[in-house]
Image (cartoon, grey):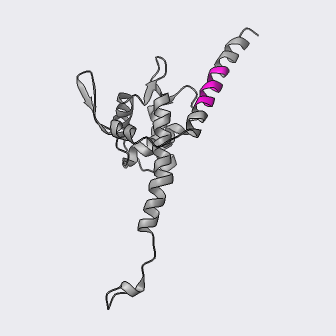
Amino acid sequence: MKNLDALRKKLLEVTDRLAGIEGELLNVHVDFPLFQRLALPVARGKSKIPGIKIHDTRMMRLLEVLLHGGPQVNGWRTVQIWEALRTAFALFPQAYTLNQLRYDLRKMKGHGLLERVGQHYAYRLTEKGTRVGALFILFHKRICGPLANSLFHHRTNIQFHAPGQN
């Protein structure tokens, strides 16, 4: 009985965060100035953190995995993210190393897209990170994907082949 209040409080936090994320995902608008701002490097202390490019496949995959992080209530540990990425996209450990992931996480944290959860080495997307992740993913899947598919996956017209080509 004495833990019921603590459990209720924790579940309210989780429910509120979930409702906020779902609201953000349903209210996504293409924001080109945001793309431009993210592409610029930012200074954090004495170090300069590179920009996040919209065409960066590693960042797209990372954002997609972090957006689908429903079971990670207490945030993601780095190794959990790495394993989820490798599983979701069938990557070999050499194709995306743990050091590359740490570099990408540092970039995301520097741009305010990722935050540490409490005193643990676990991470979760910020509100800005959720908004940017949804924007990036939807932009790629709804605009770039169909455009690229229509441009590069078409049937060639035999009439325009040079003589002697099959």
User: What residue is rendered at 55% in x and 25% in y?
Assistant: 74
Task: Tell whether 43 sits left or right of 91.
Answer: left
Q: Is residue 125 visible?
A: no
Q: Nearer the viewer, residue 24 or 89?
A: 24
In the rendered image, the residue lying farthest to the right is: 1
16 in the magenta segment: yes
In the rendered image, the residue lying farthest to the left is: 46
In the rendered image, the residue lying farthest to the bottom is: 164
Residue range (magenta)? 12-20
Q: Is residue 17 visible?
A: yes
Which x, y percent locates residue 128?
46, 30
User: What residue is rendered at 35% in x and 37% in y?
Assistant: 38
Which x, y percent locates residue 31?
43, 40
Task: Tell whether 42 sits left or right of 32.
Answer: left
Which x, y percent locates residue 98?
38, 38
Q: Nearer the viewer, residue 42 or 7?
A: 42
Tell me the quarter of the image containing the N terminus: top right
Tell me the quarter of the image containing the C terminus: bottom left
- 154 lies above or below 67: below
Q: Nearer the viewer, residue 69 or 161?
A: 161
Which x, y percent locates residue 139?
47, 48
Q: Quadrant of residue 157?
A: bottom left
Q: Quadrant of residue 60?
A: top left
Task: Tell whether 65 sits left or right of 57.
Answer: right
Q: Quadrant of residue 19?
A: top right
* Magenta stretch: dominant secondary structure: helix
139 in the magenta segment: no
User: What residue is rendered at 50% in x and 52% in y?
Assistant: 141
User: What residue is rendered at 38% in x and 33% in y?
Assistant: 108
